Image (tube, grey):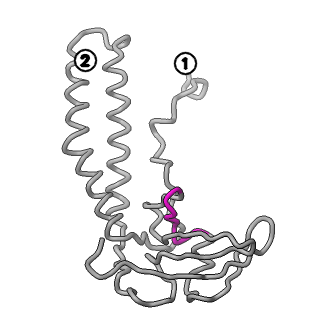
Amino acid sequence: MNKAFVKENTEDDEEDGALPPLPAGTKNYITPAGYQRMKDELLQLIDIERPEVVQVVSWAASNGDRSENGDYLYGKRRLRQIDRRIRFLIKRIESAEVVDSSVHHGKDQIYFGATVVYETADGTEHKVRIVGIDEIDPIHGDISWISPVARALNKAREGDAVSLRTPSGLEELTVLEVDYPAPGAA
């Protein structure tokens, strides 16, 4: 049958879609801690997880009929996921530009790596840390340097009011506090 008429599973062929691609012409800025986490994950996958899965797949393959062998099928799928993640991490690590934000310690202007406390027009306070695209964690307040909030806050100082363009219109943010990690701190 012609492949054009066969529905194929493209899930395994797609790159890791958990993180958005970098905008064209920008650098992959990352904090030292984020860079180390990515390297640690890569080593964990290469040195521990992948060899364990290869061993399971090898054992399952030796058991005979592979078409109904759940260990074999799951192992092969997991191996593809691990390999895809390894390729993704290698690309991101190679393109990463580590930025040590502790050089700004004690300053009140917002740059990459800053922890910022700001207030919205309704009086709600928010605390965010501006990090690289590979280390975003909205639950813990880590936002990407290319996010609309980070772009609005960039280069502002404590006490400044900045405008954030939202789908519902302009929103006024007031910078209350700017902090950077101390030199030598992670």
Q: For the residue carrying disc 1, how many other residues have a C-alpha within 10 Å: few (<14), some (14-19), or many (20+)?
A: few
Query: Would residue 92 be found to the left or right of residue 173 on screen?
Result: left
- Between residues 33 and 70, which one lies in front from this camera angle? 33
Count the labels in the image. 2
Residue 6 x %, y %? 57, 24
Taking 160 as reference, is 171 left or right?
A: right
Q: Which quadrant does the N terminus fall into?
A: top right
In this rendered view, identify the residue nearer to me: 159 or 80: 159
Q: Position of residue 72 (x, y in %)?
A: 31, 20
Q: Residue at x 49, y 73 (%)?
A: 26
**What residue type is disc 1 on?**
Met
Q: Is residue 138 left or right of residue 55?
A: right
In front of the other: 141 or 133: 141
Q: Secondary structure at mark 1?
A: loop
Residue at disc 2, secondary structure? helix
Q: On screen, 147 above or below 174?
A: above
Answer whether residue 8 is magenta in the image: no
Q: Which residue is mark 1?
A: 1
- Kindly identify which residue carries mark 2: 60
Residue 78 in which image quadrant:
top left
Residue 144 falls within the magenta-colored stretch: yes
Locate residue 68: give its quadrant. Answer: top left
- Left or right of 166 in this view: 140: left
* Residue occupying image coordinates x 41% and y 80%: 180
* Image spot of residue 119 (x, y percent): 65, 75
Q: Nearer the viewer, mark 2 or mark 1?
A: 2
* Image quadrant where one finds the C terminus: bottom left
Of callouts 2 and 1, the N-terminal one: 1
- Disc 2 marks a residue whose amino acid type is Ala
* Alpha carbons under labels 2 and 1: distance apart: 30 Å
Q: Which residues are magenta?
A: 139-147
Relative to 44, say whether 59 is above or below.
above
